[in-house]
Amino acid sequence: MIWRFIARRTAMLVVTGLVASIAVYSALFVAPGDPATLLIGGGKPPNPHLLAEIHRQYHLDDPFLQGYWRWLSGMLHGDAGQSLSYRDSVTHLVTGRIGNTLFLIAYAAVLIIVPGVVLGTVAALRGGLGETVVTAVTTAFMAVPTFVMSVLLIWWLSVQWRWFPAYGAGSGFAGRVEHLTLPALALAAAWTAYVAQVTRSAVRTELVSEHVQTARARGIPERVVVRKHILRNASGPIFSVAGVAVAGLIAGCAVVEQAFGINGIGALLIQSAAKQDLAVVQALALITVVVFVAINTLVDVVTVALDHRVSLEGTS
Amino acid sequence: MTGTHALLEVKNLHVTLTGDRRRRTVLHRVDLAIPAGAALGLVGESGSGKSLTARTVLGLLPQGARVEGEVRFDGRSLTAMAPAALRGIRSHEIAMVFQDPRAHINPVRTIGDFLTEGLVTTRGVRRAVAEARAAALLGEVGIADGARRLRQRPSELSGGLLQRVMIAAALLTEPRLLLADEPTTALDVTTQAEVMAIIDETRLQRGLAMLFITHDLALAAAVCDRIAVMYAGSVVEELPSGHLSDAEHPYTRALMASRPDLGGPGKKLTAIKGRPLSAFETGPGCAFAPRCPDARDTCTTQHPALLPAGSGQAACHFPHHPRAAAGAAERSTSDA
Amino acid sequence: MSTYQIAALGRGSTRLGRLRGLIRGRCVLIVAGSVVAVTVLTAVFAPLIAPYDPNAVDPTAVYQPSSSAHWLGTDDAGRDILSRLLYGARSSLLAPALVTLTAGLVGTALAVSAAWLGGWYDRLVSALLDIVFGFPGLILAVVVAAMFGAGLTVAVVTLSVAYLPFIGRVVRSAALRERQLPYVSALRMLGVSGRRICLRHLTPNLLPLVLVQIATSYGYALLDVAAFSFIGLGVQPPTAEWGLMVANGSTGILAGRPEQSLYAGVVIVVFVIACNLLGGSLSQRLLGDNR
């Protein structure tokens, strides 16, 4: 059962990846004007000589499928072409920046999962006023978009209190932690609130469930009841929503990197979109979408492994 | 019944719960006694407070519940017991079998986890040893391939098998008292009989005392020594199961009359008029008065106490003597 | 995954139920309703209310604090922040409205036709909706902006596509259920054409659901449009728009003048919370559910 599910999800992943790659590649030809202009970057006066050169270099006059295949196999081999506006290879642009982005995502993921799960669990187990407060605060946080949270954090923790730098990514581990704390907080805030709420309701659902009552009726020690019955059974939805949150970070990175002036993939994507440098945008969009869908697939598979009850619904 | 040697004694139990900001009485007055090795059938319509009585015994009431009166187990008061000691009672002395095994067994973990958990976490038994004992006990409750079942999950077992697993789990800790809360209601009829036979057999073999909760009077009479009948949160009658036909309380008799008889067609089933009341809806008088055919003025104003009557005890102002009643009926027909 | 989460989100304790009751209470609803109504009115009547031209640059009055002349102060170019917020409501409110309405219209058409026709067409539509659902909307918008150049039109069109699944998937499954109802087969036996059944019977019956989906996704659409303007690919300066104002003000923050960003940010958050509360209440009224 679970293997069939994994196979199905993997097939869906491959199909989505292929559809995404075709869509991304054909962007070059759907866009108005000569595709070569888009590869040079927007705004520049087209030089016929240069255009012809680019047409030859990028095989733009080949049949669509042939061109697509050349582009895709290049991407798969780590060759994502040249960016004319950056005068650099796309692969080099990406590898130079991916460290910052991965660090930021990992940092934000920790900030989402650890406090989110802990807050939600404690709120549900303790109940009472604490639960009300956690619910109220998380509801408010969920309405604050990342970009507003970014400027609030810069104003409050960077300008007013001077605790953290407002710009840049820093270098080395300590420098990165220092520089990326605010961006990671801004990126994480709404998702932490969301994870806390889902955790709270998942734990509460288990807390009042009949099988937990059975465990108590059998005199099982309370910590074992919490760990082996309540948290164990709530781990499916908690993991699932945490995974959705981490996948969401990939898109959210763009906003935060732009807000905090971090030299990362997201900022690169936005800046090259603004320059209409399609070679870079294509490569980054494909990477982003594939990683996004892959994480979602992985999350679904792990969720099913954690809680076999879901697989019955998932495969039907 | 003499309460001096009873294993479980419930005296004057009164329980209220809070829900929707209101405090509601769910048990008015429950008195029960079960001697060691004996079985008491607790019978009543749904909502009469049977399950809550069992839950109160184990201290499994929801938050905000208030308990008055006393529950004594082997001389010790369970209602006054500290949580840790009560946990000890739950894990060593009293085991419970619930109505719906599908909901009451953790669906995510294996049958083996469920069965051995009690032994491993509360007795310090090694897992391998616990598994061997669990597999052996599964054989005793009629599950042949125990070792394989231990690796399975609840969703792979039928309801009947799951209930046997639940019974095995209860027996595994070698308790002295079994609380069986409608253990066969969720099962189909043939499985019901098998599971009931297993409960009855294993109980007698081990000399286990049992509180058997059911709405099926005949089933209770078949497996229990004595019967207690509950109505709207109170015990209204308590008597040996062999004397059910001489019941004193009009409600017990109405229950007997509303039972289909396999004796043959021709006899009309009598339904009890009106709907059963919840404990919090009752007035100052007898809770059954609005539905009682023999109710008089006193019944609506005064609460009847549980007093010796006939072969047991009944809470009725006008305990009915069937033979006298039959005679009265004869007289009235002859008059006409 | 989604059904599981929703199931998990369903229950709550009585205390939280009370809190939720309070949030859903009439009092809060009136406040949320007035916030939305007032904001919409200011957007419509901005030229009449605004004390200044939102684009009037005044180099002599840069970063003014709030005063009787400029209630909320001025920005880095000496423009009146209050006037810019009032005018900014126009594109900030209109763009997500266009996004949700377009997605609602096209999504409903796709969903109802797919549910009615079934077969390969239904499979194709569902697969496309699933794939779009799997894409991060913001990334889609960035790619399209790279193709056609940045601007509000690109943002609105792309986000409309990205929001299609939010309406299409829900409406399709509701339409599938509706199709099974006896009155539909009765209409068919009377010889009513499929087109007519879809347009005159199915769609009107699904309208409450469509409205609820549009209302509940409006707040998210507003945040997405604002985020898109914030990163510089949506509304272009000097047009006043809330997301853009947050971005514009961020240079002022480091200079110790956070007013523009903070006011615009607060306006966005308050308005979105009000929208979400109204959407939730609408969904409760029309569908009777507790989302």
Image: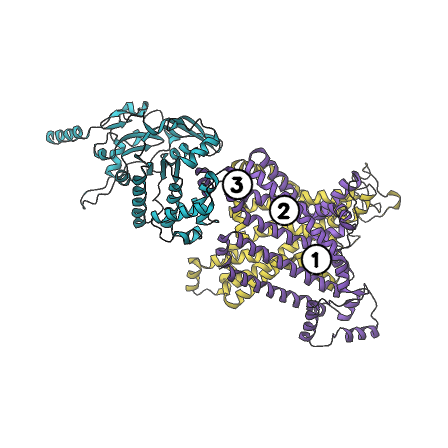
What residue does disc 1 label?
A: C155
x, y percent for residue A114: 63, 44
Q: Nearer the viewer, residue C26 or B238?
A: B238
Label at residue A201? none
Q: Amino acid at mark 1?
A: Ala
Above or below residue A25? Residue A106 is above
Instruction: Identify the colour of chain A in the image.
Output: purple
**Disc 3 sits on a residue from what chain?**
A
Distance from the alpha carbon under mark 2 to that under mark 1 = 31 Å
**Disc 1 sits on a residue from what chain?**
C
Q: Amino acid at mark 3?
A: Val
The reply, left or right, for residue A293 in relation to residue A71 is left
Label 3 neighbourhood size at 10 Å, few (<14), some (14-19), many (20+)? some
What residue does disc 3 label?
A: A226
Q: Residue at x 71, y 42 (%)?
A: C266
Disc 3, SS: helix
Distance from the alpha carbon under mark 1 to that under mark 3 = 47 Å
Label at residue A113? 2
Q: Nearer the viewer, mark 2 or mark 1?
A: 2
x, y percent for residue B60: 44, 35
CB of mark 3 within 8 Å of CB of mark 2? no
CB of mark 2 within 8 Å of CB of mark 1? no
The reply, left or right, for residue A211 in relation to residue A277 is left
Image-quadrant location for residue A14: bottom right
Instruction: Identify the colour of chain B in the image.
Output: cyan
